Image (tube, rainbow, N blue to C red):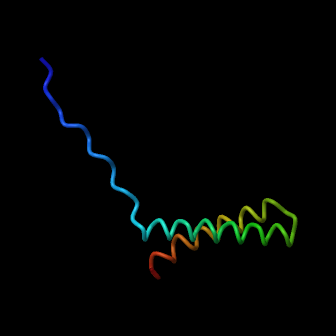
Amino acid sequence: MPEQTSPTPPPDRLSLRWALILLAAVVAGLLAGLLTYAQSHNWPASLLAALGASGGALVSLPLLL
């Protein structure tokens, strides 16, 4: 007879602090990308600006909040 094993516990939920940080990083990336595209009509440059803004927000916001 197989042993009874307890089910695995559910993963921890994302804290409100990290949810806000990730949301702010997405908003910063979208804003930077859209403004860059509106100014230059160059999608690779707008993608780089969006990734840079999102990365910068992910690095700096945990230190501020």
Q: Describe residue 14's horizontal placement relative to residue 53 as left or right.
A: left
Q: Which residue lies at the image location 47% right of the left edge and 65% below the top edge?
A: 19
Instruction: Name above or below for residue 10 compared with residue 3.
Output: below
* Residue at the bottom extreme of this rendering: 64
Q: Residue at x 15, y 29 (%)?
A: 4
In the image, 27: left or right of 38? Answer: left
Give the answer, above or below, for where 42 lies relative to 61: above
Residue 8, position as x, y percentages in the image: 26, 40
Seen in the picture, residue 1 relative to 62 is either above or below; the reply is above
**Picture coordinates of residue 44, whole percent (x, y):** 78, 60
- Percent coordinates x, y for residue 56 in the rendering: 58, 73
Compare residues 8 and 56 and report the one nearer the observer: 8
Quadrant of the image containing the C terminus = bottom left
Residue at x-position 61% and y-position 68%: 54
Q: Position of residue 57 (x, y in %)?
A: 56, 73
Q: Is 53 displayed left or right of 43 in the figure? A: left
Residue at horizontal 61 percent and vertical 65 percent from the top: 26
Query: For residue 1, which quarter of the picture?
Result: top left
Along the line of sight, the residue nearer the viewer: 35 or 23: 23
Asked whether 48 or 3 is in front, the reply is: 3
Q: Image quadrant of residue 39?
A: bottom right
